Amino acid sequence: MNQTNSTKKPEQKFRHTIQSDLKNINFRKDFSNEYKNLSRFYLDSEKKSQLESMTFVERWVHKFAWLTKSMFLHLTPLRRILVLLGVFLLFISSSVSINSVSLSSNWGLFGGLLIVFVLFLELKDKLLAKNELEAGRKVQRALMPEQNPEIAGWTIWLFTRPANEVGGDLVDYLRLNESKTVLTIADVAGKGLQAALMTSKLQATIRALATEINSLSDFGKKINKIFHRDSLPNLFASMLFIQIDSDSGKIDFINAGHFPPLIVNDNEIKELSKGDIALGLVSNAEYNEQTLVLKQYEIFVAYSDGVFEARNEYGQFFGMERFQKLIKNSSSNTPQQIGNSIVLQLEQFIGDYPAADDISLIIMKRNSQRNI
């Protein structure tokens, strides 16, 4: 009895999967999205520009030809030959005679099986890569700090979401002592595994040196020198490194090429001054320490470019104006409420369009004048 049930389970699972697919699929919409994703991945900006000046028929023919060629060239040599052979055999149907004995041979079926075999190989590679990236994502999540670190007199909300399986944004938090806490938001150029590895390297460097800070300017110099020495050529990262004194409300920070943070109160949003050069561009860089005192109920917001550069399917950007207006309208809320509202608005704005960049936020609010 148990053996019969166990043999039926895979069949039931397969049947249930197909039924679920047929029930949930929106063929026209899903096919259109997949086709657009193909174009975004395989066609460069030059070819996309050429397509704009073509008629509908010309555009369709050229796009299909370019996609096919680009996809074909991305295959391994063996798989390219198998695909060519499979396509060739699809158009052949012949009869072979040996010693007056006619052997019917369905070469088209064999050609189709060759192409399906190549699809199996490509799917295997994709699943292997996906499993490795998923493992990398788990490591990144494990290295992430808690979303709501507790600091007496303050409310803090930390958030980062990669555009793909792994990301190049860093949001981190480290308590140095009872009154001193440091936070980091950084963005390594690029996407994917390369950016993720360099982000982990940057996080490890910051954590190793953070406990030995004499001045933020010197700290910035050391971080930049190490990042420049150990990173790939022409790779850089922006970083906002923040040190807060929970007793006094004083915030000291250095800005290495990152977007200026925002100070928000009931009446206005103030953008702080721009920072210095990004990490990794030169080996010897100077970083100026900036200082401010956050008043009671004022909000400090640091963010990555993935927030205001988020784009929808119509090519429209979320934009700084919309982002700042959203923060101002919800400034009486807690940092977590503000952050969740921003993320929700971004999700609704982007819709089904693939995320173009990682999204990261640090939102801090001072609740009392003294540490309680």
Image: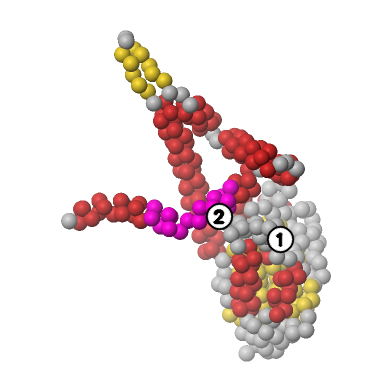
- Residue type beneath disc 1: Gln
Residue 28 included in the magenta stretch of the image:
yes
- Residue 269: quadrant of the picture: bottom right
- Residue at left offset 44%, top offset 33%: 112
- Residue at left offset 76%, top offset 53%: 281
Residue 70 in sight in this render: no
In this picture, residue 67 sits left or right of residue 133: right
Of 28 and 246, nearer the camera is: 28
> Residue 318: where, in percent of width, then height?
70, 65
Dot 1 or dot 2, earlier in sequence: 2
CB under 8 Å between discs 1 and 2: no
> Residue 73: where, in percent of width, then height?
59, 34
> Residue 316: where, in percent of width, then height?
71, 60
- Residue at left offset 38%, top offset 18%: 95
Secondary structure found at label 2: helix
Q: Compared to 109, does 29 lie above or below? A: below
Tag 2 residue: 29
Q: Quadrant of the C terminus?
A: bottom right
Q: Which residues are the magenta region?
A: 18-35
What kind of secondary structure does the magenta stretch mostly adopt? Answer: helix
Residue 53 included in the magenta stretch of the image:
no
Q: Compared to 123, does 159 lie above or below? A: below
Tag 1 residue: 316
In this picture, residue 31 sits left or right of residue 191: left
Residue 86 in sight in this render: yes
